[in-house]
Image (tube, coloured by chain):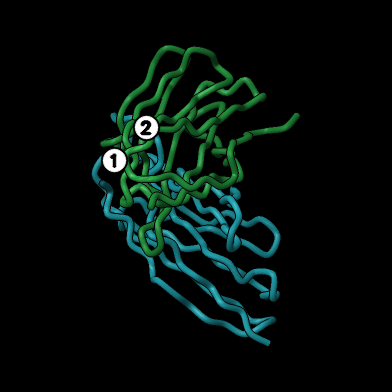
Chain colours: A cyan, B green
Amino acid sequence: GQNIDQPTEMTATEGAIVQINCTYQTSGFNGLFWYQQHAGEAPTFLSYNVLDGLEEKGRFSSFLSRSKGYSYLLLKELQMKDSASYLCAGQISGGSYIPTFGRGTSLIVHP
Amino acid sequence: NAGVTQTPKFQVLKTGQSMTLQCAQDMNHEYMSWYRQDPGMGLRLIHYSVGAGITDQGEVPNGYNVSRSTTEDFPLRLLSAAPSQTSVYFCASSSDLQETQYFGPGTRLLVL
């Protein structure tokens, strides 16, 4: 596998900012996805990074550093509905390109 | 446009029984995948397909077979169910491997 590592659980306060980190092995790396998954539901797409830098989409932003094998998902103005699992998934070039998922970070947002 | 559909939603099997989990997509996507999700393990790739007639193994293929006779359908067969196959199974499709995967609602399988 690609050894995708991310924290198991994080907690944050409504209205705050939280950063969820993800590290991966850089050998053969092509791109990185972030998905959101609410309990009992299917994952839904948040972002896809191929190039270094920050991509912003409303309250959610995703950052990638290819040389460091590092990505993060930044959630601003947290809402209760943001309580979910956040999945980091990496692609390897030269293989199937089918993403390999990390174990997910369970985010709990409290009032 | 229904997206990715999976049937059944829930299933209980006895050890040794066989069954097929159905997956269909109406978006004309070439790429389809099957994942299983277990507590604390994330999504693990079972089998995938890059087009009709082409399938390949993922990370955890043992005990499962797939076929891709049409672009739309990608069934997953459990040959002889074991309690270790108790899991939630997700099917996903994408038009391009640099595009998002769309996931089906999942099938929750319990093997006794």
Q: Quadrant of residue B4?
A: top right
Residue A17 lies, in percent from the top left, at: 60, 77
Residue at left offset 28%, top offset 48%: A2
Count of labels in the image: 2
Residue at left offset 69%, top offset 76%: A80
Task: Determine the chain carrying the residue at label 1.
Answer: B
Q: Which mark is residue A43?
A: none
Residue at left offset 53%, top offset 13%: B70
Relative to the observer, which residue lies in front, B65 or B95?
B65
Relative to the observer, which residue lies in front, B88 or A52?
B88
Q: Amino acid at mark 2?
A: His
Question: Pointers 2 and 1 in contact (CB under 8 A)?
Answer: no
Circle 2: element type: strand
- B63 over A14 or under it: above or below: above
Q: Residue furthest right?
A: B1
Residue B40 lies, in percent from the top left, at: 38, 64
User: Which quadrant of the rendered structure holds the C terminus of chain A?
Assistant: bottom right
Q: For mark 1, does the 10 Å Cα neighbourhood hold few (<14), some (14 to 19), or many (20 or more) residues? A: few
Circle 1: element type: loop
Task: Determine the chain carrying the residue at label 2.
Answer: B
Q: Which mark is residue B59?
A: 1
Residue B90 lies, in percent from the top left, at: 50, 43
Q: For mark 2, does the 10 Å Cα neighbourhood hold few (<14), some (14 to 19), or many (20 or more) residues? A: many
Residue B112 lies, in percent from the top left, at: 38, 52
Q: Residue furthest bottom?
A: A111
Give left or right: position of B18 versus A19.
left
Q: Amino acid at mark 1?
A: Glu
Q: Which residue is mark 2?
A: B47
Distance between the Cα atoms at labels 2 and 1?
A: 8 Å
Q: Which tag, 2 or 1, sits closer to the chain's start?
A: 2
